[in-house]
Image (spheres, coloured by chain):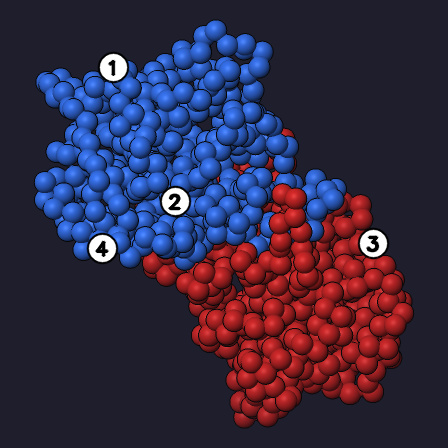
Amino acid sequence: MCRIGAIKSKRYLHPSNALRLMRSQQKGHDNSGFAFVMQDLGGMFENYKDLPVLSMACTNDGMHIAEDILHSIGFVRVMQWSPDVHPHEGLNIEPMPNYVFEVFNYPHSYKYAPKEEKEELLLDTRLKLRKALEEADEGYVYSFWPDVLTLKEIGDPRDIGTYFGLWEENQDFTAKIITAQCRQNTNYDIVRYAAHPFFLQGYTTLVNGENTFYEKNRLFQQSLYKGYIGFESDSQCFLYTLHYVNKILKWPLKYFKHVITPLPFEEMQMRDNSEILMRIKASLANLEINGPNAVISVTPDGTLFTTCDSKKLRPVVVGKTDDTVIITSEVTGINELMPDRDISQDIYPNEREMVVVGSDLNVERWKQ
Amino acid sequence: METIDTRDIKTNDICKNDLKWQIEYNPQRCTLCGKCVAACTFNAIKVNVERRRKVYSEGPLPDPHVKWITEPVIKQVVTCSKNCVGCGMCAKVCPNEAIKPVFNEHNRYNVMFRAENAESPKRGGRSNLHTEGRTLDKIKIGRISQMTDPSLDAMRHTFDILAPFGRVMPPESLPFIVEDGDLKMNHSMPTTNWIYPIIIGDMSVGALSTRMWEAVAIATAYLNEVVGLPVRMCSGEGGMPQKLLKSRYLKYMILQIASGHFGWNRIINAMPHMTEDPAGILIKIGQGAKPGDGGLLLAKKVARHIQEIRGVPKSDLLSPPNHQGLYSIEESVQKMFLSMNAAFKFRVPVAIKVAASTTSVSVYNNLLRDPYNIVGGFFLDGIAGGTGAAHEISLDHTGHPIVSRLRDCYLAAVHQGKQGQIPLWAAGGLGMMGTLAADAFKMICLGANGVFTGKLILQIAGCVGNDFGKCNACNTGLCPVGITTQNKTLMDRLDVDKVAENIVNYFIATNTELKKLLAPIGNSTLPVGRSDALITVDKNVATRLNIQHVC
């Protein structure tokens, strides 16, 4: 089973926190990888909030391929950072030759472009990079988006942490939102793209579970939007549905829950807005999920939330202090990072709930 | 001693050995009660006498004498018109097991009937040619939840077993606006009704006896109002009793309009008096059991009450093979769909039923464009479906299996990104082995939103026919069990309440079985298009349907 976790704080936090959060839940996963997404970046990235950050793992040839594409489109590199790596024998990790985090200026012609156009450009560019790297088998591009940074690797999370020096906290490499997971996908081939968290245009999603409507979701999503690709994991479908509902259809966030786990008909009919709910159930039937799932997501405005399947078949817990909220699979993770919090305030969401953490860390429980 | 002149044997005389069914009669067990002759609606047996030569001997030493006696017996009628259909009523009523029909595999009936009568044989039932095995029986539900995700508990968990009937709008076309963080609808939309994923298929009052039709209607109402399963029944082409049209039970009925428009003048007249909308309208273009052929109700079944309901005189009622005046898909959408939608002020979903065909995908692709959003369902009927009457040549030799065609239609919709927008309903021999839940479930996994079934309902009611030539006499008006006849005496054989009870029970059992299939694959709602749940050991089936091949 997966274990997933998310930290949202008023302070900038180092990813060592995410590593500790997940390591404490190691009995529940198989230690086969470590992946995290950092949003609302601090440290050396803090001054570049509006500029897209490319997160890539590749070979030297892969670097050249990517740079050629980016330059041809007109992106100009502003800053580049690569983590110091500490390879030594005995580490269980399958590293790529290069880990690249680069900040770019938009092409000149986009200087006055509206936000939506820039967002499309970033997505198109990422898809182009991914395709080129995939065809040449020279690397992976995980995200290309302002204020977002992604790292995914195969191996033992502890060793991955050692390799990247993530155990030592510092102020250069930080973020206010970090989502992480410690396991490779088991249903399909182990590929880096299949590791949560999944990211698309400001939306991040992690799922602990098994989406048994994967086939339905995939067949529908593949023709919905150009960014819905890969499908290396059944959990990617959650990200695409969230993106579709909230960004493409522009529906309020609460309707995500109504789409993935519609209320039973009997309950639906008793609601004031039953007509709307029935329409959603019919028109978005192919985005409904089944099976046991606990979801943690981040939206572009930094809202963090969790919800789960309609039968509550996977665990998730929310804990908070004055300046930090953690959502994760097991309470042991929260205990590790926030042992002194008021545990009576911990929330174990039920099958009809979304627990939503807003910008000022206010925690709300939304009843479906 | 009588002499035998072999020239008396006339080659072309019909004899018992030419017929499909032979009566096996044991005079030793017969009490001559006459029940069998009374029960045979086809007059295929009669009371007769046979001359018997008895040799007897009296006294202690052999002293043979000959005695001629005349003995009453039950005898098979040997003609091409009044022949035994194997229904077995004689055996059913015989107190002593003295009589029964036996299938004669060496019969010459197919040749003789045509040669004698210059006529194409007609009958009811399904295709009686078994040239291929059933595809659905080669498919298993193989994706069982074990460690990665838990199976559900069929008895404890809740399941939503409902399917849409009506046009489903693409998400981006939903007329939603956001007001104070909530979605609101800013204009009306096509009606979509959520109903049980098994519709009781279209069998008209006329094809069915009034008592049988009434029993189905009673069962439907009971399933809705007492059991809580929103099962819908389709009227078939032939209208409905006025009383029902004006009752609140109309909401459980789907009204059918076919090329003969039978019963529609009465339906239209009843409209101002309707207290409920019907559940839907089904435009019947074709029927899987006899594609390319219209409805056929022979005059012998057009009794007085049928004339009244349909508004017709007593005569053979033949629906044309096509709706007159329609010559293209676009036109049918504009004319038929629009007018039927308009008739009920766009409150009642309108669907279309066609026979499965190699052209089904083109038709469905065209309908999916549906510029007016008025196509509320695509009903696809396969070759193994049943019918009350058809030419045997149509029944046995025309048609298309349902499984691959349904799958093709679903995948065509997927290709357009429009799956689910015009709900797919499939039929054609589903449940013919008695296990409707399994058939329905597999069809749903292959992409159907739901299924419809007709012949099975007759089997539940007590139809003795089968797909091996037994009975299949629905066209004759002489149905021995009172299901497809308008003869009052024969109808009396049918216990309406018992039939309704059996249908209700069958649906309750089927509902439990659907849960028993949903639970192991970990689903609480219908797995429409979840072909990953299916496996087959047949490579050809796997390739054709794009499901997993296993061995």
Q: Colour of chain A?
A: blue
Residue with the mark numbered 2: A201
Mark drawn on residue B497: 3
- Per the model, the C-alpha gap separating discs 3 and 1 is 80 Å
Residue with the mark numbered 4: A73
Count residues near mark 4 (Cα–Cα under 10 Å), then give few for <14, some for 14-19, many for 20+. Answer: some
Task: Give whichever of discs 4 and 2 has the lower sequence position.
Answer: 4
Count residues near mark 1 (Cα–Cα under 10 Å), then give few for <14, some for 14-19, many for 20+. Answer: few
- Per the model, the C-alpha gap separating discs 2 and 3 is 62 Å
The answer to whether marks 2 and 1 mark residues whose Cβ atoms lie closer than 8 Å is no
Task: Give whichever of discs 1 and 4 has the lower sequence position.
Answer: 4
Residue B454, percent from left and from top: 66, 63
- Please tell me whether residue B62 is drawn above or below residue B361 in the rendered image: above
Residue with the mark numbered 1: A168
Same chain under badges 3 and 1? The reply is no
Q: Colour of chain B?
A: red
Residue A256, percent from left and from top: 54, 42
Viewer-nearest of discs 3 and 1? 1
